[in-house]
Amino acid sequence: MDIVALGVAVSKAVAGSTPHPILVVENLWKRYPGVVAVKGASIKVFESEIVGLVGENGAGKSTLLKCVTGVIRRDSGRVLWMGRAVDFHSPSEALKHGVMYVPQDIVLAKNLSISDNIFLGMEGKSMLATREAHRELSIAKQLLSELGVDVDPQIRGGEVGAAIAQIALIARALHFRARLIALDEPTSALGPVEVDRLLDIMVKLRSRGISMIFVSHKIEEVMRVADRIYVMRDGEIVAEFDRSRFNLNDIVKAMIAREIREFFPKEKVPIGEKVLEVKDLSDYYGLVKSVSFYVRRGEILGIYGIVGSGRTEMALTLIGYRRRRKGEVYVNGALVNIMRPSDALRYGIAYLPEDWRLALVYLLSIKDNIALPIAQTLKTVNLGLASPINLKSERELASKFIESLRIVPRDPYRRTMQLSGGNRQKVALAKLLATKASVLILDEPTHGIDVGTKVEIRRLMVDLAKEGKAIVLISSELPEVINMSDRILVMREGKVVAEFTRERATEEDVVKAAILKMG
Ligand SMILES: Nc1ncnc2c1ncn2[C@@H]1O[C@H](COP(=O)(O)OP(=O)(O)OP(=O)(O)O)[C@@H](O)[C@H]1O
Ligand SMILES: [Mg+2]
């Protein structure tokens, strides 16, 4: 080995033993009225490092990231960026220093092109300058293709799905030469193929010297790419794991401070008559093709399929949200005519949207959101007088769900806008459960929800089945579908392509049916 190479080796070894963190957060606090969201958190991020950040819903993960990236202001604590104390006043100031936050609910500017979304906020830039715009388009195209997506950067932000929006923001980070990207649940709205692509991108960015903080409830994903994982609980960093010590059980235990004995608490429930039967359902747009199925009292019917297989479209067509071309729907044996979602609800069919944000009125409290769909019923009981809905029973109803779904904070009067992402989802679920429908169609009910609560929601599904409800569980989480369902339908390209009983369903067969063309 020559001297120069030796020198490099030595300096690397030295650097390896005491590398300099690019980000140091010390004793950071953030209070909201009634909640201390972050309680003295300290973390470090090194160059070319992916740091996982996991914790239950409401643990304070998003708040911590937002405080570091200039989205919100911290109450106290020190943040060192590249060795200098900083206090970013806005996301754009943070971005100028190379720090970018990619939020949990990505919102691209709907009416601007993807390209404009990437360059948004660039100083001295005029949207009218066509030459500039041309240059930007080609840079945008190049950035996007570097990230492995071939999408026309002229498409508007409102027209692309979560996966592309995600990547557009990463392209923005690259363009502004971000050295630290904080990704807040970037995979929760993605299908398996898109998740793989995103994780690949993350690994590639790391090899280019970029650091990332990766928040996700899918701990296996975090374990796949992270170098280190911090666990946050109730506003505090309670554990740190190095890659060599990654272990799912230990991480989960640190997250929830208890052990989960049964991830899939399915019980045998007596199955009764058919409650809902769908025959030959097709939508107007060719995304749902002659779907037939039934679900019985006490039964959990799983519907599995990859993103784009038409599961959600099928459900939305069934409940009258999307236009139907043909097909019949029977409830308790009687043909019903469902033209719009309110008809479905009237016949006892309730739907929890995949995008649960659609289900909430953010400005209203937890209590009002839960009571909203039934308010109508309560009013009718009151003979249509503008008489007050029974406030006490509303509050009790909300409190009951806050208890059973472990919604945090436990305050029925809290606006849902102020809740963490996962807790908003729980309110959406409570809202649906409060309708007392006999058929519940749950579209990805455990997406974005922490492991502990996932188990609670699954247990709740079993309890509902015991009460005699029929449950349709749409999920792309394979173990969940297999372990929670009595029967499983597999959809592909808008059709039901296979059906398995609980006894006969294996992961391999179900996946094969979902992705392979048979014959
Ligand atoms: N704008 C706000 N006003 C009041 N309270 C808030 C606000 N934002 C967050 N909180 C509260 O701070 C706590 C931490 O929320 P945060 O969003 O950081 O949790 P999280 O770990 O990201 O959860 P999730 O996994 O559900 O996204 C929660 O109790 C939440 O209700
Ligand atoms: Mg969050």
Image (spheres, rainbow, N blue to C red):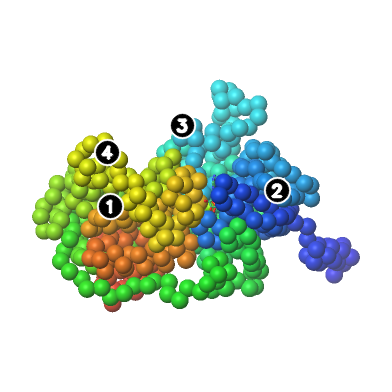
First-in-chain label (4 vs 2) = 2
* CA distance for labels 2 and 3: 37 Å
Q: Give percent across and percent down for residue 378.
A: 25, 46
Q: Give percent across and percent down for residue 247.
A: 57, 73
Q: What residue type is labelled 3?
A: Asn
* CA distance for labels 3 and 1: 36 Å
Residue ID for mark 3? 111
* Mark in front: 4 vs 3: 4
First-in-chain label (4 vs 3) = 3
First-in-chain label (1 vs 2) = 2
Q: In which quarter of the image is residue 128?
A: top right
Residue ID for mark 4? 387
Q: Is residue 416 left or right of residue 466?
A: right
Q: Give percent across and percent down for residue 119.
A: 59, 35
Q: Which amino acid does label 2 sit on?
A: Ser
User: Could you tell me which quadrant the N terminus lies in?
Assistant: bottom right
Q: What residue type is labelled 1?
A: Thr
Q: Is residue 464 above or below residue 169?
A: below
Q: In this view, does 174 lie above or below 508?
A: above
Report the front residue among 141 and 184.
184
Q: Which mark is residue 435?
A: 1
User: Could you tell me which quadrant the C terminus lies in?
Assistant: bottom left
Residue ID for mark 2? 76
* CA distance for labels 4 and 3: 42 Å
Q: Give percent across and percent down for residue 185.
A: 52, 54
Q: Is residue 400 visible?
A: yes
* Mark in front: 3 vs 1: 1
Report the front residue among 102 and 59.
59
Q: Which amino acid does label 4 sit on?
A: Ser
* Mark in front: 4 vs 2: 4
Q: Which residue lies furthest to the left in this view?
A: 334
